[in-house]
Image: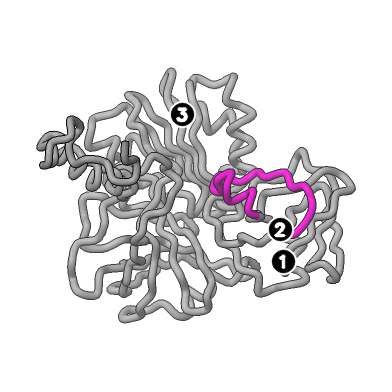
């Protein structure tokens, strides 16, 4: 038997078998197709064509409240923008290189423009100041497509709690609740009446379902006072400063509400951390990270130009490369493969007490 030159047919006939010929042709096309974008088995495998960033232009700017500006962002060509749902945010790339997330406050049914509202924070990281000072009608910028980490589930009964600029993701939720005839309430609190944006728009939805409360008139509300507005068994959606979220979380069990969804302005306070250290390069300086601070905050004191955005471990802007050490990954973005490859998000990730993480910085 000639093993090096097999016959074209299983039975030694001089011509190839028609069925086997078709089966071979099918296999030659099917096997490569398994690696195509629509048939990949591993969902973490990147697509060959990354999603392009959005090109946006500022079409309108207005003053909403004290230190709060509203911007309308549209496609320069006038085309429709990608769709979004209540609770979604837009990740803007500013001309300085900063990247910041801002909740969309407009109507998801309107795809002609995205609407955001930004409060000026002079003591912040500079993003809000840059927006206030540089973004005027005609200014161009890029953005990632809207993403949603605070999705509105449209439960039959809903309580929306907003602190200051935290009204931005909740306003579309209120509009959606009104559109679907849900049993909803909204409470908007702030330092004073002049600091509360969108008051007229909220009252226009349903003045009997909206409560506007200023701290300088009524005092800072407790979590129990806020949750007292909830219909029995309601789902609570809360966006505001950390003290407000903490108060609502602690009072939830004794309230008529049944569930809590929330979004923070920034990083959650570190409550279970241990002190550790980070080293900038193999031979660089070593920085001590206290138990109640993030590695990112400590790193930015030494490297003020280190990029960051969300402070919550989901955007990936602050990613650094780990050279040595055993980290405690606490982010919600990196895959096991990325972590194994040395990726680290210092905004939330930590290490055991006494551990030193060596970073490629």
Q: Which mark is residue 229?
A: 3
Say above or below: 197 vs 129.
above
Between 34 and 346, the one nearer to me in the picture: 34
The magenta stretch is 322-341
Q: Real-space Cα distance between discs 2 and 3?
A: 48 Å
Q: Which quarter of the rendered picture does the C terminus lie within? A: bottom right
N-terminal of the pair, mark 2 or mark 3, is 3
Instruction: Say which label, 1 or 3, has the lower sequence index.
Output: 3
Q: Residue 146 versus residue 357: which sits nearer the camera?
A: 357
Percent from the top left, x then y, of residue 137? 32, 79
The residue under the point 28% across, 45% down is 5
Alpha-carbon distance for marks 1 and 3? 50 Å
The answer to whether the residue labelled 2 contacts the one labelled 3, judged by CB atoms less than 8 Å apart, is no
Percent of width and height locating residue 338: 58, 51
Query: Residue at (36%, 66%) from the top-left corner?
Result: 53
Say the numbered circle drawn on residue 360. Answer: 1
Location of the N terminus by quadrant is top left
Up-down relation of residue 141 to residue 115 (above or below): below
Position of residue 207 in the picture relative to residue 273 (left or right): left
The reply to whether dot 1 and dot 3 touch (C-beta < 8 Å) is no
Q: Can residue 215 be seen in this snapshot? A: no
Contact between labelled residues 1 and 2, with CB atoms less than 8 Å apart: yes
Say what secondary structure mark 1 lies in. Answer: loop
For label 2, the residue is: 322
- Which residue sits at x=61%, y=60%? 319
Confirm whether residue 18 shows in the render: yes
Residue 272 lies in what quarter of the image?
top right
Numbered disc 2: secondary structure = strand
The stretch drawn in magenta includes residue 66: no
- Indicate which disc, 2 or 1, sits on the residue closer to the N terminus: 2
Near mark 3 (Cα within 10 A), the count class, few <14, some 14-19 or many ≥20, is many
């Amino acid at each position: 038997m000639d093993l090096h030159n097999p016959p074209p047919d299983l039975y030694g006939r001089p011509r190839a078998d028609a069925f086997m010929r078709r089966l071979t042709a099918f296999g030659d096309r099917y096997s490569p197709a398994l690696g195509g974008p629509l048939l990949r088995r591993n969902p973490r495998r990147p697509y060959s064509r990354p999603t392009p960033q959005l090109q946006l232009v500022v079409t309108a700017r207005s003053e909403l409240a004290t230190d709060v500006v509203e911007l309308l962002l549209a496609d320069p060509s006038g085309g429709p923008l990608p769709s979004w749902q209540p609770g979604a945010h837009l990740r803007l790339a500013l001309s300085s290189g900063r990247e910041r997330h801002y909740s969309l406050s407009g109507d998801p049914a309107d795809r002609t423009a995205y609407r955001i509202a930004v409060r000026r924070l002079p003591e912040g990281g500079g993003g809000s100041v840059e927006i206030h000072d540089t973004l005027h009608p005609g200014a161009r910028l890029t953005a990632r497509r809207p993403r949603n980490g605070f999705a509105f589930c449209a439960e039959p009964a809903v309580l929306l709690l907003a602190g200051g600029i935290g009204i931005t993701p909740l306003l579309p939720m209120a509009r959606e609740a009104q559109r679907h005839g849900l049993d909803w309430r909204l409470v908007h609190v702030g330092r004073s009446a002049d600091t509360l944006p969108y008051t007229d728009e909220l009252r226009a939805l349903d003045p009997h379902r909206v409560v506007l409360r200023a701290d300088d008139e009524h005092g800072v509300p407790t979590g129990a006072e806020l949750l007292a507005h909830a219909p029995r068994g309601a789902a609570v959606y809360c966006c505001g400063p950390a003290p407000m979220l903490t108060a609502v979380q602690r009072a939830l069990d004794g309230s008529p509400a049944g569930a809590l969804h929330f979004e923070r302005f920034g990083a959650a306070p570190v409550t279970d951390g241990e002190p550790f250290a980070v080293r900038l390069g193999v031979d660089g300086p070593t920085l001590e990270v206290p138990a109640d601070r993030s590695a990112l905050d400590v790193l930015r004191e030494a490297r003020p130009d280190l990029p960051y955005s969300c402070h919550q471990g989901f955007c990936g802007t602050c990613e650094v490369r780990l050279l040595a050490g055993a980290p405690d990954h606490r982010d919600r973005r990196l895959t096991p493969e990325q972590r194994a490859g040395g990726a680290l998000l210092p905004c939330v990730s930590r290490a055991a007490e006494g551990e030193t993480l060596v970073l490629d910085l």
